[in-house]
Every structure is written in structure tokens, then in C-alpha cells.
């Protein structure tokens, strides 16, 4: 209940949605959607972009193709308004990785390209997510793409174009996994480079 000295604002709902989006259990996206509905009907408030970003993150934790599509569309809407954050991009890339969709790697690459054309600085987690997509794909091109992604990350890191302050062992480990899994014949030579 709202007391006479407390004014409920959209930012309060956004903070709650953000906290909920970190939960790794079923039903979180639905809980955030219900929260949005409560905002509209009970308090006559409209959800802000932070709330939609939290919903994108929650949807990204699922393994459903439909929810991956829904999360991607919301992300595109947020991005078009210049209000998507790096966490939302990562969530959508991982949503495609977990979806099992035959076009998951292509879709993850498209999300990566949207991020790279935005004003949002990528971080190592974005690159890890995309590498996970390529490892999961298990196609021969994964080895080449993994090396390209590591080189791109290193270049951006050296130019100060990421939010990170140093390299990432997990990123290199994923790249080596992609090379070994998808190009076993020439893996030793590729990894040595």
C-alpha cells in the first residue's frame, strides 16, 4: 500500500525488475511482465527502458526459441532508442545459444553486429557469449571465427574500446575449444599461432 508520504515511481519498479532479472529460475520473465502490468493498472505508470532491459535479460535466461525471438525484438526496440545496455545484448546472445535453433549462431552474430554499431562498449562477456554460440554450432568455420573474435577483442582492448582492463583467460579457452572441436586436423598449428 502507498502511504501518504511515499510516492511510488517507475524507477522503483525498474529496480525491482533488475533484481529479479538476476534470478536463475523459471517464471522470472513472467513475474517482470506482471510487475509491468501492475505498474500500468494500479499506479498509472509506464515501464521505462531499464525495466524492458531487465525483461530482455530475464527472457535471455530461457532456452525457448520463441522467448529468444521476443528478447531479440525487445532488444532491437531498446537499441533503436539508444537505451540497450551490454547486459541485455549478452542475454540475447546467450538466449540464442541455449535455444537449440538451427540458426542460433547467425542470430547471435546479428545481435553482436547490432551491439557493435551502437554506442555501447562491448566487454569480454559479449565475446564469450558469441564464442559459446560458435562452439555449440560445431561447424568447421567456428575455428576461423573464434580466432577472428579473439583478435577483434584484443584490438578493441588495446584501443580502450571495451569496458575491460585486461585480457580474459576464459575467452582464450573458449577460442581453443572451438578450434579443437571444429578443426581437429590442424588444431595444433592454429592454437600455436
Image (cartoon, rainbow, N blue to C red):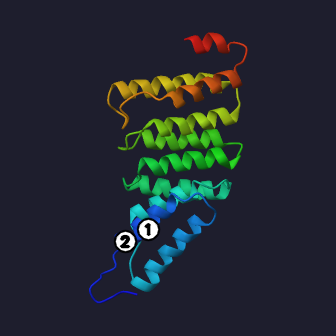
Res 133 quadrant in image: top right
| Residue sitting at x 51%, y 60% | 21
Q: Residue furthest left?
A: 5
Mark 2 residue crowding within 10 angstroms, few (<14) / some (14–19) / many (20+):
few
In the image, which disc is placed on residue 16? 1
Would you say the residues marked 2 and 1 are in contact, meaning their CB atoms lie under 8 Å apart?
Answer: yes
158 on left or right of 67:
left
Mark 1 residue crowding within 10 angstroms, few (<14) / some (14–19) / many (20+):
some
SS of the residue at dot 2? Answer: helix
Res 105 quadrant in image: top right
Q: CA distance from mark 2 to mark 1?
A: 6 Å
SS of the residue at dot 1? Answer: helix
Q: Position of residue 13 (x, y in %)?
A: 41, 71
Q: Position of residue 145 (x, y in %)?
A: 58, 26
| Residue sitting at x 58%, y 42% | 108
Q: Position of residue 34 (x, y in %)?
A: 53, 75
Q: Position of residue 4 (x, y in %)?
A: 29, 89
Image quadrant where one finds the C terminus: top right
Query: Residue at label 2?
Result: 12
54 or 108, which is in the foreground? 54
Amino acid at each position: 500500500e502507498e502511504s501518504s508520504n511515499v510516492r511510488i515511481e517507475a524507477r522503483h519498479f525498474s529496480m525491482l525488475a533488475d533484481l529479479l532479472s538476476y534470478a536463475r529460475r523459471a517464471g522470472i520473465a513472467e513475474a517482470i511482465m506482471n510487475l509491468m502490468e501492475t505498474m500500468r493498472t494500479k499506479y498509472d505508470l509506464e515501464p521505462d527502458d531499464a525495466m524492458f532491459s531487465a525483461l530482455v535479460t530475464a527472457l535471455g535466461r530461457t532456452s525457448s526459441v520463441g522467448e529468444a525471438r521476443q528478447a531479440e525484438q525487445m532488444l532491437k526496440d531498446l537499441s533503436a532508442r539508444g537505451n540497450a545496455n551490454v547486459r541485455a545484448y549478452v542475454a540475447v546472445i546467450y538466449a540464442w545459444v541455449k535455444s537449440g535453433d538451427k540458426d542460433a549462431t547467425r542470430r547471435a552474430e546479428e545481435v553482436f553486429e547490432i551491439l557493435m554499431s551502437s554506442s555501447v562498449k562491448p566487454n569480454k562477456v559479449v565475446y564469450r557469449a558469441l564464442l559459446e554460440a560458435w562452439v555449440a554450432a560445431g561447424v568447421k568455420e567456428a575455428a576461423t571465427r573464434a580466432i577472428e573474435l579473439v583478435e577483434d577483442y584484443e584490438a578493441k582492448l588495446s584501443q580502450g574500446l571495451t569496458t575491460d582492463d585486461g585480457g580474459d583467460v576464459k575467452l582464450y579457452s573458449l577460442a581453443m575449444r572451438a578450434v579443437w572441436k571444429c578443426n581437429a586436423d590442424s588444431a595444433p598449428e592454429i592454437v600455436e599461432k
